[in-house]
Each structure stands twice: as structure tokens, then as C-alpha cells.
Amino acid sequence: GNSVTQMEGPVTLSEEAFLTINCTYTATGYPSLFWYVQYPGEGLQLLLKATKADDKGSNKGFEATYRKETTSFHLEKGSVQVSDSAVYFCALRLTSGGYQKVTFGTGTKLQVIP
Amino acid sequence: DTEVTQTPKHLVMGMTNKKSLKCEQHMGHRAMYWYKQKAKKPPELMFVYSYEKLSINESVPSRFSPECPNSSLLNLHLHALQPEDSALYLCASSPPAGTDQPQHFGDGTRLSIL
């Protein structure tokens, strides 16, 4: 079956610190990989994506590279801000017929303190 | 601004009530999804509609009844819910297969069962 494993949280960092949130996956077929972010009281927003091996997704200073050899998609940011405090979900997507089947990781809560 | 609109944002209901959650998108997406999200957990898939036909029902209790009246609207009818059904209910949509676009999520309806 398909699964996504991401590091346990919460992660607490000082402002301007370097962020890494680890994510590994198991999948049949050739999934696309995503990071979603959920701010308190809101739905999920797409942060970045990668659709094939060695692709690098990036957005708002966040980056993740699709590593097929290690089945990983780790999220990184060089300098976090207080406004980055949220829950981050790693996810893989497979397409079946006319719809998408998304498998989410358990989520990692990030708290950035001034 | 979210392109998937969910109403209401909050709903409190008794166990004997009947209510409906609504979801609307005008992006031309032909797949729509209902997810349930408990606190500190990832979203769990409930139902998938593809081209207005129910494609997936993840063994959801019959007290939840989905409906897709047209390609832009998705409803979730609720009846005789239990306290454990209190959660954030998220709607999502995605374009037809063959594109790289991910699912787009609404901000959700926060449901509380008294």
C-alpha cells in the first residue's frame, strides 16, 4: 500500500533558524509529491510540489527535492519567520481514472518563536 | 482567497438534527472530495465524486450522505450524528486526470455535535 512518514512534532525554532522536516514515502507506481500547510482555523494550502524524480519544488523560501533513490521529500527553509508557524503535511498523489488519491503524512507542527 | 468555498464555516447541531454542508467551486474541476479532519490529525478521505458520480465511499456511516447535484456543487447531508463526528470537514476539488494540478481545498466547516 501507499504511505507517508514524516517526523514527529512539534518542532520549535527561533526566528531565522534553519528548518528541515523529514518525509519519506512508500508507493506503488509513480506518485507526485506535495507539501501542504495548514494555518490555525484554515484548510490546507498547497505549499510546493514535485511530479517526478529529481524535481525540486519551491515556494516562499521553502524547498523540497523528490529523491527516488531514498524515497524522500524533505522540506527545508533557510530562515524561518514567526508567520511560518503552522502544521505541515507531506503527501503523495496517485491518479486513478478521473480523480486523485492522496495519502497524507501525520503532519508536523512548527512553532517559530521571536 | 480560496477558490473552493464551503458553508457554513461553523455548525453546532444536536444528535437528532438534520443539516447539510455545502461546497462550491468554479474552476471547472470534475472531481470533488469530502475529507474529515480530527484535531492534530491529517485529513481522512470520506467520499470522491468524479464527473458527478460517486467513485469512492471509504466505508463512511450512512448518517453521512453525499450529493453532487452538478459539476460545481457538492453537499454533505448529516443526520443523527454522534459526538465523535465532531471535526473539521474539508471539501476539495481537482481537475480532470492528465494535469499536474493538485487538489484545491476549502477552509472547511467546523462541526460540533452536542
Image (cartoon, helix red, strand yellow):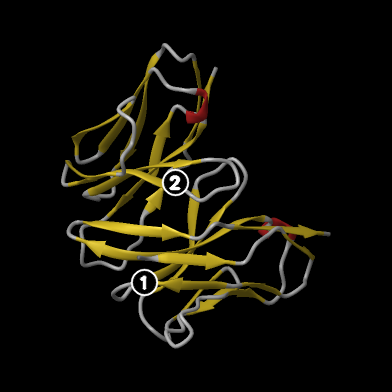
Placement of the C terminus of chain B among the 4 image quadrants: top right
Tag 1 residue: A27
**Subunit under mark 2:** B
Q: Is residue A86 above or below residue A49?
A: above
C-alpha distance separating marks 2 and 1: 30 Å
Tag 2 residue: B2
Q: Is residue B30 above or below residue A7?
A: above
Q: Which residue is drawn at the image coordinates 29% and 58% (left, top)? A: A100
Viewer-side residue, B67 vs B2: B67
Q: Which image quadrant is residue B26 in?
A: top left
Badge 1, how many Cα within 10 Å: few under 14, some, many 20+?
A: some
Q: Which image quadrant is residue B58 in?
A: top left
Compared across the picture, whether A104 is left or right of B97 comes to right
Secondary element at tag 2: loop
Q: Is residue B17 above or below residue B10?
A: above
Compared across the picture, whether B9 is left or right of A78 comes to left
Residue type beneath disc 1: Ala
Viewer-side residue, A37 vs B57: B57
Q: Is residue A89 above or below residue A74?
A: above
Residue type beneath disc 2: Thr
* Residue A101 percent coordinates (x, y): 31, 58
Secondary element at tag 1: loop
* Residue A39 percent coordinates (x, y): 60, 49
Depth-wise, is mark 2 or mark 1 nearer the camera?
1
Count of marks overlaid on the render: 2
